[in-house]
Amino acid sequence: MENLIVKYFQKTCSDEEKKALFDWIDADAANKNYYRQIRNLWDVNLISEAAGDEEQNGITYLKLIKELGSSSNGLKPSRFRHIMIRASKMAAVAVISFAIAWVCYSKAEQNREIAWQTIEVPVGQRVLISLADGSSIWLNSMTRFSYPESFSKNKRMVKLDGEAYFEVIRNDKLPFEVETAQVDIKVKGTKFNLYAYRAQPNTETTLVEGKVLMAFAHEGLPEVEMMPNQKAIYTQGSAMPEIINNVDTEIETSWTRGVYNFKDITFDKLIGRLEHYFDMKITVKREDILAYRCTGKFLYDETIKDILDVVKTSKPFKYKIEDRLITIY
């Protein structure tokens, strides 16, 4: 059965093989649990392939899947966690939490419901993933991203709480949509950066290539079409987003290359980003500090203390760090 499951992940199954697999999953709760375990290992391997030696990662994965397959009912939770930790070390990220929202299969229907998966990126890490249609996506620190195993016949839909850089494969008949807390992004084939942490009041979209349509959660607001080198900043409760032309897209997407690059942004916006990038709470005792304009470039592995120390060399403020709280005064 392991070989059939892997064939399904590789999209080389015939219709008869798919039906046999779905019937086997439906037949027993242990089968369903075993499938989930193999799915998790497969996803970790996909991420590791983007970050390391693909051939070696494939060999390691096959060893892990063989070990997992040593029991027809899967492994005990403690044993499975051990294998997952070993698998995650192949990737250039910390252990990633995968949550699979399982939708039960119906034997009465040939077309099954799609299972959604969620990736939660640990603090200080970034992840590159590939979707079923070939689109690639970078996910930034503290990002939660949900996507289906395969797309529906009508559209390609994913969900984002965080920051991501998308390179979407063009398909005029199957539009691509990103759902966030405040806006929905609709594209056919394009490259864009989307900053959309649910806890932040601003949602920022920077278009690198192609076209983007922004649709808003609030009724009555018209869709906004963006052109390349434009940045749209939508603040919760606003009538329309602010459109900035001729932005430097290299700066906006520099985090995918391991660099935080800020150019003439307010300290208020810088704080919002640092809170999510480093999982810290930052409070400011003087409101005028929030209006400071900041420019800087920092490597991904630098600490929040490193960044604040550089910023304060040209701005009059001090700070103190207590556990996960930073106070600026």
Image: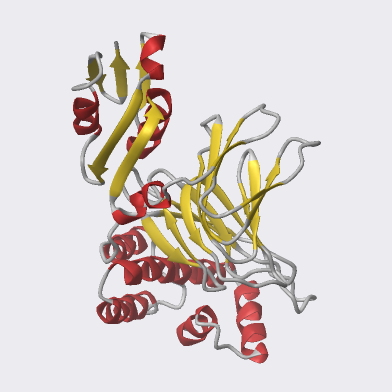
The residue lying furthest to the front in this view is 246
As drawn, 241 above or below 184: above
Count every numbered label the image shows and give the total. Answer: 0
In percent of width and height, residue 227 lies at 59, 53
As drawn, 32 above or below 23: above
Choose between 81 and 232: the one closer to the eye: 232
Q: Residue at x 40, y 49 (%)?
A: 140
In percent of width and height, residue 326 lies at 30, 20
As drawn, 244 above or below 325: below
Left or right of residue 126: residue 311: left
Q: Quadrant of residue 115?
A: bottom right
Choose between 173 and 250: the one closer to the eye: 250
Choose between 310 and 24: the one closer to the eye: 310
In percent of width and height, residue 23 lies at 66, 79
In percent of width and height, residue 153 lies at 73, 72
Q: Residue at x 34, y 51 (%)?
A: 254
Q: How is the image coloured?
A: secondary structure
Q: Residue at x 30, y 66 (%)?
A: 51
Q: Quadrant of residue 27?
A: bottom right
Quadrant (top left/top right/bottom left/bottom right) for the C terminus:
top left
Q: Quadrant of residue 105?
A: bottom right
